[in-house]
């Protein structure tokens, strides 16, 4: 028989058993809707957590690491050759070394034109003490290029009051951590007295406040221009303690870190090594999200299977009459497969719309916390592939859910059914 006739019969079966069809469709609707909501919210949340760490983490960080001396005096003494004695050395002291990066200007200039590099920002980390009367609070003053930090690492997302531009335009300015400002009762426009480890006192004007969401950072960290941080550290213009690389493709990070170490003899760490534990946690959360979501769709498919299986027993006479009037077993099988696909199409379409609507509701729900000052609503990821994948999975699931009952219906002997009647 033609597909058009078979489709009309399947549609008639669906309409004739509205209650069962609606229940089966609701199973698909619930599965697809929950899949969309769960995937959108969980991947959005994972994206938020990833952003909190990865957006502020350079893809490659170049720095100078203090390490113990590789060559000890005993190893240079001819009376104790390495091949005859085991040298046990205790309390090895680190070798005297500057914390600044050698040939930092050469590294920056050499990689500025590299096609893999999106941007490079040098930094100066200076140990300081925030002074309030006779009280000294431990702190860290980080010298940055404000505009580049905002462009490459979303620094402006964490500035509560003021902006990176205010820091750029004020050579004597500072963006103070919210925790420090709260402890010292300081506001924008105030001057904060500071002392460096050499005992030199200086003051910087507060032009902004920032909050990272990490209390241990907000209680000590502050940002200033590179020149101000170099002055606080008592160093000159060529002094840099860190160089941060942002790449177009994060996958080049490991290769570039090894390349920098070989070429310049510096220490370089890529984002994968620096955040190995965090990456593992993200992978596990994503795996759980996909596993739960797919399980919901499979459960919905079993619901359709049970309903169609029961429908076959109720439609025994109809199947026998169809076969007696010339419909083949494959025709009957296609009728029930079409019926399952109709249920999947109706339930899947409603589920996609319901999931999209509920995702919008969640996306607009207020979510405010002091730990994340720039986040105002719950994070939701409206990736179109979730909807495409959900729709395809709904149709595939309902097809297989209807195939087994349809195959069973195609093997029914009409003579036995009619003889029993």
Image (cartoon, grey):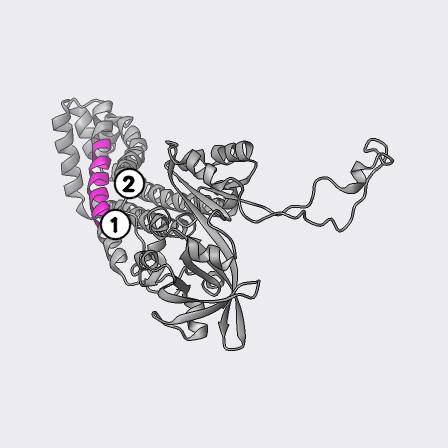
Which type of secondary structure does the marked residue at label 1 adopt? helix
Q: Is residue 100 left or right of residue 118?
A: right
Q: Is residue 81 left or right of residue 126?
A: right
Q: Is residue 380 left or right of residue 97?
A: left
Question: In front here: 410 or 38?
Answer: 38
Residue drawn where x is 53% and y is 63% of the image? 196
Residue drawn where x is 44% and y is 42% of the image? 59
Percent x, y of residue 35: 32, 46
Q: Quadrant of residue 332?
A: top left
**Residue ID for mark 1:** 355
> Looking at the figure, which quarter contains the N terminus?
top left
The correct choice, above or below, for 364 with respect to 289 in the image is: below
Q: Is residue 8 left or right of residue 347?
A: left
Q: Quadrant of residue 346?
A: top left
Residue drawn where x is 43% and y is 51% of the image? 53
> Looking at the figure, which quarter contains the C terminus?
top left
Task: Kindly tell me whether residue 20 is visible in this rendering.
Answer: no
Question: Chief secondary structure of the magenta span?
Answer: helix
Q: Are marks 1 and 2 in contact (CB under 8 Å)?
A: yes
**Which label was assigned to residue 106?**
none
Question: In front here: 380 or 202?
Answer: 202
Q: Quadrant of residue 158?
A: bottom left
Residue at the extreme front of the image, as rendered: 236
Q: Is residue 256 magenta?
A: no
Task: Kindly tell me whether residue 390 is visible in this rendering.
Answer: yes
Q: CA distance from mark 1 to mark 2?
A: 10 Å
**Which label was assigned to residue 390?**
2
Percent x, y of residue 368: 33, 64
**Magenta residues (range):** 337-354
Which type of secondary structure does the marked residue at label 2 adopt? helix
Question: In front here: 381 or 225?
Answer: 225
């Amino acid at each position: 028989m033609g597909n058009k006739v078979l489709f009309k019969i399947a549609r008639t079966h669906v309409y004739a058993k509205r209650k069962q069809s609606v229940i089966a469709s609701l199973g698909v609707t619930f599965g697809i809707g929950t899949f969309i909501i769960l995937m959108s919210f969980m991947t959005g949340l994972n994206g938020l957590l990833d952003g909190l760490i990865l957006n502020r983490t350079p893809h490659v960080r170049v720095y100078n690491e203090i390490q113990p001396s590789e060559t000890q005096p005993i190893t240079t003494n001819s009376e104790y050759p390495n091949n005859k004695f085991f040298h046990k050395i205790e309390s090895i002291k680190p070798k005297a070394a500057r914390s600044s990066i050698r040939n930092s200007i050469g590294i920056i200039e050499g990689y500025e034109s590299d096609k893999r590099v999106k941007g490079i920002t040098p930094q100066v980390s200076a140990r300081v003490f925030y002074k309030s009367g006779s009280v000294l609070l431990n702190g860290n003053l980080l010298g940055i290029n404000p505009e580049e930090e905002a462009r490459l690492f979303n620094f402006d997302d964490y500035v509560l009051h003021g902006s990176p531009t205010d820091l750029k335009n004020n050579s004597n300015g500072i963006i103070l951590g919210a925790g420090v400002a709260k402890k010292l009762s300081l506001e924008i426009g105030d001057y904060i007295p500071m002392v460096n480890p050499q005992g030199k006192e200086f003051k910087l004007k507060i032009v902004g406040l920032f909050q990272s969401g990490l209390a241990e950072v907000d209680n000590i960290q502050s940002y200033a221009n590179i020149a101000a941080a170099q002055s606080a550290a008592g160093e000159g213009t060529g002094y840099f303690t860190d160089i941060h690389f942002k790449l177009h493709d994060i996958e080049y990070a490991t290769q570039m870190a090894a390349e920098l170490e070989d070429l310049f003899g510096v220490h370089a760490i890529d984002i994968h090594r620096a955040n190995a534990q965090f990456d593992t946690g993200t992978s596990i959360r994503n795996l759980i999200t996909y596993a739960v979501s797919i399980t919901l769709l499979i459960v919905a498919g079993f619901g359709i299977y049970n309903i169609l299986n029961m429908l076959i027993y109720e439609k025994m006479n109809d199947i026998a009459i169809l076969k007696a009037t010339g419909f083949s077993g494959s025709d009957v099988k296609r009728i029930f497969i079409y019926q399952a696909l109709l249920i999947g199409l109706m339930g899947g379409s409603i589920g996609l719309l319901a999931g999209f609507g509920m995702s919008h509701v969640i996306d607009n729900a207020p979510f405010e916390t002091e730990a994340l000052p720039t986040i105002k609503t719950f994070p939701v990821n409206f990736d179109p592939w979730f909807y495409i994948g959900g729709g395809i999975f709904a149709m595939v699931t309902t097809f297989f859910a209807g195939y087994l009952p349809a195959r069973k219906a195609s093997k029914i002997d009409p003579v036995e059914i009619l003889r029993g009647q």
